[in-house]
Image (cartoon, rainbow, N blue to C red):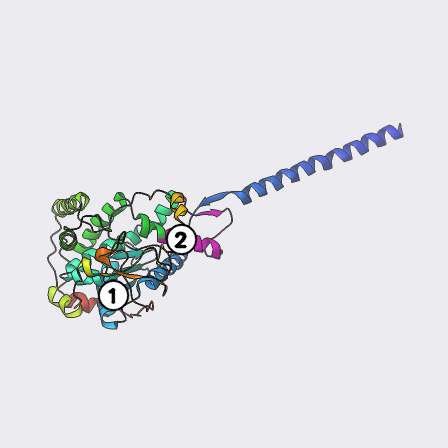
Amino acid sequence: MMRIVLGVALTCAAAVPVSAQLGQIGKVVSVAKKANEVRDLSMTDAEEQELGAAVSERIRTRYGVVQDAAVHRYLALVGTALAQGSTRPALPWTFVVLDTDGVNAFAAPGGYVHITRGALALVKNEAELAGVLGHEIIHVTEKHTIRAIQKSKAVQMGAAETLSGSSSLMERAVTATYDNIVERGFGRAEENESDEMGVTLANKIGYAPNGLVGFLTTLKDRNQASKEKRGLFASHPEMQERLDRITKLIASKKLTATATVQPRFAKNISYKPVPVTVIATVDPGAAGLAGGDAKAAEKKEDPKAAEKTEEPKKRGFGLGRMLPSGGGEKKSAQVTASGGARGVDPEKDSKGGSNPKVVPVKLVAADITAFKKDGGLP
């Protein structure tokens, strides 16, 4: 009898650990499964600024920065006046003039707004500049780039992964962000939103809301002789539809601000436009040009590599889709005459300067107040 009881006791004792072991196995499997789970890219405001700073560095390395403190201070005054009226006034906004004749305006996450001296050369007054900057500011405030990456699932994170805690993840995010803005561009929905909200923002600050229309019209006329759809600002039906839509929006919303502040703009900006046909460009197949990375070099050397090339994705349109992707411009990059360069977009592939250093600008509230008062802005 004692042996039987002892046997039953031992059997029961053995049964409990087996159950516990199964439970532990289940927990291990659950933890392992969770560790392998991925989620869409997410980030804090601080991580967004870190991402934007890295993307901006790539852009500045590619095109260089105009080392003119007075020009940057003026740009920062106009841009900050607009940014303070946006939905994200607390961002540490940074406004940069890129050192290239190509026409472009570009916004990176976290408050980094870039405009080329080639674009400034085509602007006629401060209201037009406000229209361009307002458009780019909206891309930032509405997080268009981040949302596009999340939607495409171009970058996904591990269950416990954070953007700032992983250098490899940050690098992938920087590359995806740069590629999304530069190569693919924003979709029509994002561009329409930036047009509409940007025009409304400019009007709110006191600038004539048709400034963006004036600038886009100049670009449309500039490209009317082009046989190809060059870059973002090419003359094509979408541009005219865009102009018509913005004009109707201004009328329907009864946006009636009138300030153009042309004399102050002319006093601060004196760049002269360079015709598309004479813009110095960098051969997109040359090593070092954004997009001219190792894969591009391989395609150039290996004829069969072209067979492996994927069909380009359909690009969006807007103020921020004219920069090539990739890193800085190497000495081996070939500079060509844009008019005869096959496959070269003189706006996108324009040669840039060699100094990527940011020109620091320090502004206080009193500076913005005085600036607005001097320009007759409310």
User: Who's the residue at 51% across and 49% down the image?
Assistant: 160
**Residue 184 drawn at (x, y percent):** 32, 47
Label 2: how many Cα within 10 Å (few below 14, some 14–19, many 20+): few
Quarter the C terminus occupies? bottom left
**Residue 288 drawn at (x, y percent):** 37, 60
The magenta region covers 153-178
Q: Is residue 154 left or right of residue 220?
A: right
For disc 1, the marked residue is 76
Q: How far apart are marks 1 and 2 (CA)?
A: 45 Å
Question: Is-magenta flag for residue 171?
Answer: yes
Question: Is-magenta flag for residue 247?
Answer: no
For disc 2, the marked residue is 301
Is residue 143 something one can see in this rendering? no
Amino acid residing under circle 2: Glu
Task: Determine whether 303 is above or below 104 in the image.
Answer: above
Question: For the residue labelled by badge 2, is the local secondary structure a helix, a strand or a loop?
Answer: helix
Classify residue 187 by image quadrant.
Answer: top left
